[in-house]
Image (cartoon, grey):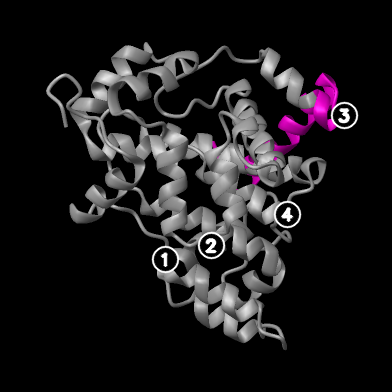
Amino acid sequence: MSNDAPYKITSAQMIDALGDLKRLPSFSNILSEFDRLVLKPEGAHIEEVVELVMMDPRLSAGILQVVNSARYSPGFMISDVSQAVARLGVTDIRVMIVALNFRDLLGDAQGINKNAFLQHGLVSAFIARKLAPKFHVDPYDAFMMGLLHEVGLYMMALYHPEGFKELSDMSMYKLTRLLGAEKAVFGVLHPAVGAQLIRKWHFSKLIVMGVLGHHSPVKVDREYQNAAYMTQLAEAGAFYLGYYNGLVTTEKSVLTDSMQAILKRTGLNEDEFVDLLASALREAQETGFVG
């Protein structure tokens, strides 16, 4: 590193450095084991899923909390994990495993509001899942891209608090200045750092590329551009609703020119998009993930 650019680093070097410092977050292997179960040719038996969920007390408690939320509650208290799994079903259980793990895996970082960061990711995830059919993306993959799209920013805060403070000051806490500040301070952008980490977690290339391209969809290969545009719009929707990413903000309830351009690609008009955002937020709140 040069003296005039003391924090410059590549995305791979940043992830490796965090790994060396034992500060690199990792997803629970319960997710990969769950996927192995449900992808078996004969399918997964509910007893196997219940046994897997019960291996993690925090996951069990989280799923019971969700199944008794306004969105899923049958009108009486469910306290049995097997009943919860049966009511939620495979698709929603998978989403819950991801969301609950994400909420628990991040360490504390200076200079970024962890709760706001998590809320922004969760709101973006529910928006992305609503947007998925418009972009021909699997709803689960969409949820993952929305949830993880800013994880590279959090890694920057974990990696070097002093450098991140410099980045924060340079950005003036405005979204429009964020990428320029990242480039000036670290020489790398948060989408690249996030993509590097998600690749290390062994998620699909579609999820990696959707996150990598969420600030510049045209720069990723054409086959991944729909995913990147969808992730960009999901993030913009979270900002529109007032859920900032823990560092920078943008004007609430304003559709920017870039948002309008992406909407035009999907055939959604402004009123339909605002309705979609309201529906996604209501769903996120009803599950108890978002306040």
Which of pointers 4 and 2 indicates the residue nearer the eye?
4
Residue 288 seen in the figure:
no
Query: Label 2 amino acid?
Result: Ile
9 sits left or right of 204 in the view: left
Task: Kindly identify which residue carries mark 3.
Answer: 267
**21 or 16: which is nearer to us?**
16
Q: What amino acid does circle 3 point to?
A: Gly
The residue at the point 56 percent across, 29 percent down is: 215
Image position, residue 54 (x, y; %): 48, 76
What amino acid is at disc 4? Answer: Asp
Say which amino acid is labelled 1: Ser
The Cα atoms of the two marked residues, 1 and 3, are separated by 38 Å
Q: Earlier in the sequence, mark 3 or mark 4?
A: 4
Rendered position, 194 above or below 41? above
Q: Which span of residues is magenta-colored?
A: 264-291
Please tell me which of labels 2 and 3 falls first in the chain.
2
Do the residues under discs 1 and 3 have CB atoms within 8 angstroms? no
- Percent of width and height locating residue 128: 67, 41
Q: Residue furthest bottom?
A: 42
Q: Position of residue 146 (x, y in %)?
A: 59, 42
